[in-house]
Amino acid sequence: MSAPFSVEIQRAHFIDGEYVAGDATFDIFCPVDQAPLGAMATGDEEHVDAAVSAATRAFPAWAALGAEGRLPYLKRFAEEIGKRADALAIAEANDAGVLLARMQHGIVPRAMLNITWFAEAALTLRDRVIQTPQATHHIRHDPAGVCAIITPWNSPLMLTTWKAGPALASGNTIVIKPPEWAPLSCALLAEAAAAAGLPPGVFNMVHGPGATTGAALVADPRLARISFTGSAATARLIAGVAAHNLVPCSLELGGKSPFIVLADADLDQAAATGALMYRNASQVCLAGTRFLVHADIRDAFVEKMRSVVDKLVIGDPRDPATEVGPIIHPRQFERVKSYVERAIVGGATVLWGGEAHPFGPLYFQPTMLTDVANDAEIVQEEVFGPVLVLQTFGDDAEAIALANSTRYGLGGVCFGETVHATSVAEQVRTGFIWVNSFGIRDLAAPFGGRGQSGIGREGGDWSFDFFCDVKDVMVPAKPFVPSFAHR
Ligand code: NAD
């Protein structure tokens, strides 16, 4: 069954091509059984200063290499990630509780692709020429400079490479602050960067808590960009600092996405996909957590989904048979439990689940609540645990109105006859929505949310737009005549 944790990982910061330890450390634990996973270095202001200084020094030469010059480095980086595939999978299964099988088959290959895809895409950045009667405009995408990358614990490797890939490929240098509850896969990523021979200072990592290490990083006035994924509460703090320093930031935040089941949906497909919302114990920003089901098929859908959920294998994420693992941390577990308790006190009916699961102290049963008012906390707020709500609607207009009735606007799912479902999906106010499917993530496509779900888009050209400064170099079409009357 579960493998004991035996991966050797550097626990120090990675600054200017060197491992840098410090006196202070913080401990990390496995969410399955609270087994200690060792101590990580805690970064202070000096570590952050050293990392940003190194990235500042390394920037001109890395930028000057051009996309072609950077390509071999980044290909080697991806290869080094691949060489550590097992270690990465074990690390994240242990500290974040992500399924080992999902790490091996989904996330590690995707992390490699996050590096190589953007490295190759950068070769054809949308530099172009605009010719007008007055001038030739050479439109360039210049790398912005030193970029801070801050990611959450629910999918650290995927989210960190999703940012590091385009940032590095377009010529920026980076300082990463990994999530303190699950820093191990990021620490291995630094080892991969070192083994790939990325020039010193191009890739830096400082570990530590958000409130101290993270706050010190985002406050550094030398940053050119801040790329953040996490909660809206933290995003507000970061955006405030970024506003003061006039640093552009990209904010990928939480969601309360609708999962719409129209009357003409394939209910078996919808129910099987609905159960996927419990993946990673629903600690997934893009999960559809508000089920909006047509009243005519509500009972049939509930029965079908219940029968799928009843068979879910809840257990140790390191066991290949497991489908749903633990909640990451006691604090998060208490948060999830208290949301459910308040919802029940408020009149919610439990369709299934509703309580802690006996597998371990941080396990909660996959839960579905119904009979909830639309303005109830459990309908309006992101729980970030295996707790879904189900409401019914009578027609498309009501489904769309309910779908659009939270402050969030990240994603969505819509099951129904394809033309019908597509038409409904188009009217849902989110950054993306899957029709009769879930979880398709193409690197070329934009990803991000509206409202409280974030500002900005990542993926393809949208990532490059964020990590680059667009510049227009103008050469006049005719000899220029200096004149005060000239506009
Ligand atoms: P969080 O905001 O608490 O922490 C995210 C990161 O920010 C961590 O690395 C943390 O150390 C750091 N941080 C905290 N305070 C900081 C500060 N003052 N300055 C700088 N950095 C700071 O979020 P979390 O609880 O780790 O993650 C869960 C949240 O992330 C959920 O809301 C989830 O929906 C969201 N999320 C969004 C996406 C997306 O792509 N939209 C993806 C995954 C998770």
Image (spheres, rainbow, N blue to C red):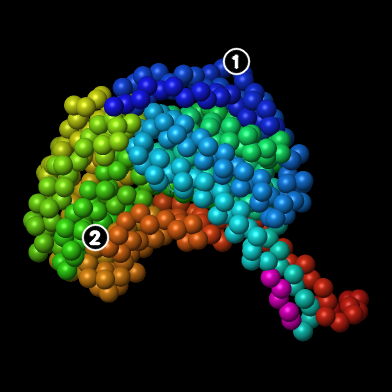
Q: Which portion, as a residue range, is magenta?
A: 128-132
Residue 153's quadrant in the figure?
Answer: top left
Q: Which x, y percent locates residue 434?
A: 33, 61
Residue 120's quadrant in the figure?
Answer: bottom right
Q: Is residue 134 left or right of residue 347?
A: right
The residue under label 2 is which amino acid type? Ile
Q: Residue at x 55, y 29 (%)?
A: 207
The kind of secondary structure element at disc 2 is strand
| Badge 2 or badge 1: first in the primary sequence | 1
The residue under label 1 is which amino acid type? Asp
Q: Which residue is mark 2?
A: 260
Would you place residue 275 above or below residue 183 in this image?
below
Q: Residue at x 47, y 61 (%)?
A: 445
Q: Which residue is mark 1?
A: 23
Would you place residue 322 above or below residue 249 in this image?
above
Q: Residue at x 64, y 25 (%)?
A: 19
Total numbered badges shown on the rendered structure: 2
> Closest to the observer: 425 or 239?
425
> Quick check: is the Cβ at mark 1 less than 8 Å away from ligand 1?
no
The answer to whether any part of residue 332 appears in the image is no
**Gap in angstroms between the C-alphas marked 2 and 1:** 52 Å
Q: Residue at x 72, y 54 (%)?
A: 66
What is the quadrant of the N terminus in the image?
top left
